């Protein structure tokens, strides 16, 4: 543990969170002793915390067995606000900051009904800018965002999605194999950086947000650069990619991943 972590540690809070996380990972109610063993504490150490969590409604104690289980309070709290609204709020300032720094438009996309949905857009500060309207839907295989979202999908979900995709089904076997290999490359490099397949004169940079090895990603940040406007030598491709990664880190910090 480093000095900063030690300075700001809150042992009681840590114990409470340990209890909640451990109970959430179990499929059956547990006794005080079983919980203590699971989080490597003694039963006496967690007694007051269990009483507090029960009184606040986060856990429930069976009257007969005396065992504890999670209540629905955490579920209720997590659903009081739309996850999409929270993501939009978290991304708004970092996206606007990025657009002003690199002088190119950028947007955030998510997977929706097996399509790409743009949920927030930040316009370039210049007089000429590429605009992608919020709420628009785009096909997965034809966009930078879609390819990144696909690349980070769990394998079974990815293959099922593509098997049912009308565009992918029209590809020849060789094209399908090449497409799958391109998704592997995206995952290896951690980003997509190529000329747009759908708009001439545009280069797309796409980076995943909230990468999880089991559940894919939360969203995708994409910069669609108008090549004719990218004449500022102080803002080269390497700089743009670095700034985009900084933006992703800021968004991830704001959403807690």
Image (spheres, helix red, strand yellow):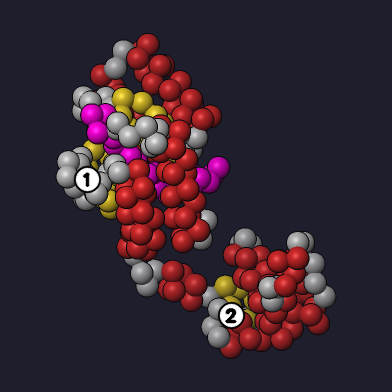
- The answer to which of marks 2 and 1 sits earlier in the sequence is 2
- Mark 2 surroundings: few (<14), some (14-19) or many (≥20) residues within 10 A: many
Going by the picture, which residue comes out furthest to the front? 233
* Depth order, front residue of 236/179: 236
Q: Position of residue 26 (x, y in %)?
A: 64, 62
Q: Label 2 to label 1, Cα distance in Å?
A: 57 Å
Number of labels in the image equals: 2
**For the point 43% across and 23% down, which residue is it?**
182
Q: From the viewer's perspective, tell me whether residue 237 is left or right of residue 195.
A: right
Bounds of the magenta span?
208-229
| 93, above or below 31, in the image | above
Q: Position of residue 147 (x, y in %)?
A: 37, 32
Q: Is residue 64 visible?
A: no
Describe the element under mark 1 as helix, strand or loop: loop
- Mark 1 surroundings: few (<14), some (14-19) or many (≥20) residues within 10 A: few
| 58, above or below 154, in the image | below
In the rendered image, which quarter is residue 132 located in?
Answer: top left
| Residue at the disc numbered 2 | 60
In the rendered image, the quadrant that contains the N terminus is bottom right
Q: Where is residue 56 in the image (x, y as percent from the top left)?
A: 55, 86
Of circles 2 and 1, which is in front? 1
**For the point 57% across and 73% down, which residue is it?**
70
| 195, above or below 244, in the image | above
- Residue 112 drawn in magenta: no
* Depth order, front residue of 40/190: 190
Q: Which mark is residue 126?
A: 1
Q: Where is residue 226 in the image (x, y as percent from the top left)?
A: 24, 33
* Depth order, front residue of 188/19: 188
Q: From the viewer's perspective, tell me whether residue 76 is left or right of residue 82.
A: right
């Amino acid at each position: 543990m480093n000095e900063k972590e030690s300075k700001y540690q809150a042992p009681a809070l840590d114990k409470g969170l340990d209890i909640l996380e451990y109970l959430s990972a179990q499929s059956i109610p547990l006794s005080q002793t079983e919980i203590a063993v699971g989080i490597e504490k003694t039963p006496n150490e967690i007694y007051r915390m269990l009483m507090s969590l029960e009184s606040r409604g986060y856990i429930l104690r069976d009257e007969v067995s005396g065992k504890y289980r999670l209540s629905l309070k955490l579920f209720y709290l997590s659903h009081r606000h739309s996850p999409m609204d929270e993501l939009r709020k978290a991304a708004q300032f970092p996206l606007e900051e990025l657009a002003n720094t690199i002088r190119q438009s950028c947007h955030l996309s998510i997977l929706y009904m097996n399509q790409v949905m743009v949920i927030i857009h930040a316009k370039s500060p210049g007089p000429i800018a590429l605009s992608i309207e919020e709420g628009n839907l785009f096909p997965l295989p034809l966009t930078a965002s879609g390819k990144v979202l696909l690349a980070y999908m769990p394998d079974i979900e990815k293959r099922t999605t593509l098997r049912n995709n009308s565009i992918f089904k029209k590809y020849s076997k060789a094209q399908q194999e090449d497409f799958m290999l391109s998704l592997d490359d995206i995952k290896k490099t951690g980003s997509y950086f190529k000329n747009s397949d759908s708009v001439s004169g545009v280069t797309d940079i796409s980076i995943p947000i909230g990468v999880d090895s089991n559940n894919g990603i939360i969203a995708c940040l994409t910069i669609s650069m108008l090549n004719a406007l990218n004449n500022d030598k102080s803002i080269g491709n390497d700089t743009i990619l670095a700034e985009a990664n900084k933006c992703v880190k800021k968004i991830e910090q704001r959403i807690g991943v």
